[in-house]
Image (cartoon, grey):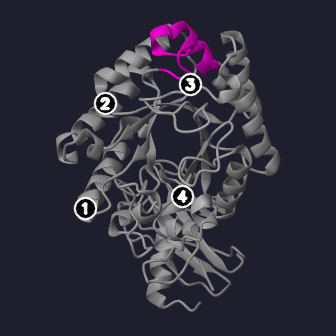
Amino acid sequence: MHKSPRQFVFQSLILMALFLVCVPGMNRVHAQFVKGADIGWLAQMEATGYKFYDSTGTEQNCLKILKDHGINTVRLRVWVNPSSDKVNGHCSKNEVVTMALRAKDMGMRVMIDFHYSDSWADPGKQNKPATWATHSFSQLLTDVYNHTFEVLDTLKKSGVVPAWVQVGNEIPGGMLWPDGSSANWNQLGQLLNKGYDAAKAVDSAIKVVIHLDQGNDNARFRTFFDNARTRGVRYDIIGLSYYPYWLGTDYSLTINDLGNNMNDMVSRYSKEVMVVEVGGDYTQVQNSYNMLVAVLDKVRAVPGNKGLGVLYWEPEGAKSWSGYQLSCWGANGQPTKALDAFLTNAAGMNGMIPFPGFRLYPNPCYGGLLNIDHHAGAGHGTISIYDLSGRLVEEQVMGNTTTEAISPGLKPGTYLVNIGDGQHTAVKKLVIP
């Protein structure tokens, strides 16, 4: 499909925001700020014939629509032996593998959310899978380990290593009730550690998340994670849900509590934090947009870059299909403007001290020399060129002048040029037609 110059520039800028995070004083790509979507319903929506349309009204792959709105990560729930119910089933191991591969092919990262149930697990219910119902506690420990390992090992053998794994879904009261209830923390701690051990056995790079609801409630989180610390529970990241709609208040009344709680979690437990679920009323588009922008800003503001990102729960789950109020999809099959919040304030770009006069020419570059002006920082530092997967393709140490010339010999495409000298850093988009 032909794109106008304006469309091309706009989409290229989105890609730059997606794939590069720069920190003053560094000349390497940092971990992407997570802009994510839980898409557990997508496979069954497609199977029932639901059609997705982009903002122009053109029928489009849902993952492509999400990516064009800044989404770089998907979250997939997995159930042990799910039913075939349209809304309350699916999400089997095999379906999750298929969806994870699709996401990977779109250049997205993957989070796996283990419910350890045959259907929904949340603060109000943590039902054991039917096949585990009569198992002893010692057998439940084996069940958790084996199920976690099997799903993740299958993913890895299929070509996808999830970046993050949740051991349990919204578990302030524990999981696998009654054995793993928070009324019996010694057993809950053992179950959580079995999930952690299984994830790390598949791949040590996987980050393990423990997830609670009501992310604005500091006392709720302190109570849980103090107990976890006392029992030696192993995990890497504290995951939070934040739904002002379910709290019955406008986000403006609780957003500071969310920020303060995340800051406290980082300080108190020396862990990273991530808002793994968020959502707003699809009929209140402007309010939901404002809420999402505020949540993204609070996570970015967590000290030490310990705020990893934000994931919207089922943005594509239109109420006409799911009955769910908190998607950001309209009755016309198109995303609402609320989803545009993920295009704001590109991750890692805010707070950057740019090189005065840093520019690339010619840009677009039709081959041959690429000239780089950097009117500060001459004499030290590095020029690094990355493709849009974050792979370093060219690097050169800056000389003692304010002008550099390199002959990168790049294939046609869009690249990101990062220049840093220890005091300044800046990024420019480079196009090779």
Q: How far is the residue under mark 4 from the one under mark 3?
A: 23 Å
- Which of discs 1 and 2 lies nearer the camera? The answer is 1
Tell me, yes or no, whether the two marked residues, 1 and 4, touch with CB atoms within 8 Å.
no
Give SS at disc 2: helix
- Residue under pointer 1: 284
Q: Is residue 302 visible?
A: yes
77 left or right of 204 in image:
left
Tell me, yes or no, whether the two marked residues, 1 and 2, touch with CB atoms within 8 Å.
no
**Residue 407: percent from the left, percent from the top?**
68, 76
Image quarter where the C terminus lies is bottom right
| Badge 1 or badge 3: first in the primary sequence | 3
Give SS at disc 1: loop
Q: Which residues are magenta?
A: 174-193
Q: How far is the residue under mark 3 from the one under mark 2?
A: 18 Å
How many other residues sit within 10 Å of disc 1, few (<14), some (14-19) or many (≥20)? Answer: few
**Residue 416: percent from the left, percent from the top?**
56, 67
Q: Nearer the viewer, residue 142 or 418?
A: 142
**Picture quadrant where residue 49 is located:** bottom right
- Residue under pointer 3: 235
- Residue drawn 50% across the image and 60% down it: 71
Give SS at disc 3: loop
- Residue under pointer 2: 261
| Badge 4 or badge 2: first in the primary sequence | 4
- Residue under pointer 4: 72
How many other residues sit within 10 Å of disc 3, few (<14), some (14-19) or many (≥20)? Answer: many
- Residue drawn 66% across the image and 11% down it: 137
| Badge 1 or badge 2: first in the primary sequence | 2
Image quarter where the N terminus lies is bottom right
Q: How far is the residue under mark 4 from the one under mark 2?
A: 25 Å
Q: How far is the residue under mark 1 from the one under mark 4?
A: 25 Å
